[in-house]
């Protein structure tokens, strides 16, 4: 915590937050106040200091548009929200990963965009390849299908599902045949035809063809 590393940071931080005339507050520090891994012990050592720090930020969030805290140290990506404050651990630049692959344990970088009153972020995975899978490739109008994709890090170091928090976007080439949820990969067949489903992430893409045929009236 700040008290352990340099107590003089506390009055400096309090004054800075109380007098800042801004729309958005971004704080960067190495060790997260709370370890994002269940049972982890690498957060701040004093729970009272953690509460004081996060209460101070919560009060700041009441008078500005947004407050974000970016940390590293725990290798992977994690998000936690408390009292209007977003706490993001983004530490996937190349060191050995701590988190499980399906819970943020993949190599990545985070892109933050500020546009007026809005702030959003994307967690961009570092990928060598993408594979996409579908339980079936033949549908009838009205059918739904959940597609999935897997990302493989450079040198095959880790494989992980391309779902949140990883940046991912699903599209189809013909929305008269089928539509798809861009975030989840849930496909809804509409009319007979062939549709190419593409998933994009980290600058790479993979596709699969799905055929929609007229339903058998005797089925």
Image: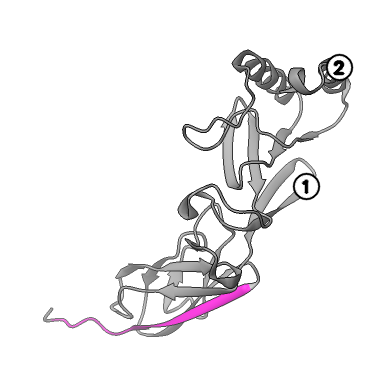
Q: Position of residue 49 (x, y in %)?
A: 67, 16
Front-most of residues 143 and 78? 78
Q: Is residue 209 shown in magenta?
A: yes
Looking at this view, is 62 or 43 the one in front? 43
Element class at badge 1: strand
Q: In this figure, which residue is indicated by the disc labeled 1?
A: 114
Residue 42: image quadrant is top right
Q: Position of residue 97 (x, y in %)?
A: 57, 52
Q: Is residue 196 visible?
A: no
Residue on which the image places disc 2: 8
**Quadrant showing the N terminus:** top right
Tell me, yes or no, whether the highlighted magenta stretch contains residue 157: no
Residue visible at 83% across and 18% down?
18
* Disc 2: CA contacts within 10 A as few (<14), some (14-19) or many (>=20): few
Q: Magenta segment, which residues?
A: 204-217
Which secondary structure class fits the magenta region best?
Answer: strand
Q: Is residue 20 left or right of residue 175?
A: right
Where is residue 83, by image quadrant?
top right
């Amino acid at each position: 915590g700040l008290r352990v590393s340099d107590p003089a940071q506390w009055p400096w931080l309090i004054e800075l937050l109380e007098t800042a005339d801004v729309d958005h507050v971004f704080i960067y520090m190495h060790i997260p106040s709370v370890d994002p891994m269940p049972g982890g012990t690498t957060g701040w050592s004093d729970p009272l200091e953690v509460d004081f720090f996060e209460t101070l930020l919560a009060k700041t969030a009441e008078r500005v548009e947004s407050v974000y805290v970016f940390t590293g140290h725990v290798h992977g990506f994690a998000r936690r929200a408390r009292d209007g404050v977003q706490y993001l651990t983004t530490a996937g630049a190349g060191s050995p990963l701590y988190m499980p692959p399906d819970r943020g344990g993949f190599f990545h970088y985070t892109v933050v965009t500020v546009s007026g009153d809005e702030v959003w972020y994307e967690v961009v995975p570092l990928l060598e390849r993408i594979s996409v899978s579908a339980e079936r490739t033949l549908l009838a109008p009205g059918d739904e299908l959940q597609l999935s994709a897997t990302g493989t890090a450079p040198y095959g170091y880790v494989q992980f599902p391309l779902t949140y928090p990883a940046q991912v976007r699903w599209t189809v080439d013909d929305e008269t045949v089928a539509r798809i949820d861009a975030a989840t990969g849930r496909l809804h067949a509409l009319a007979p035809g062939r549709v190419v489903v593409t998933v994009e992430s980290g600058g790479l893409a993979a596709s699969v063809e799905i055929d929609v045929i007229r339903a058998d009236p005797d089925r």
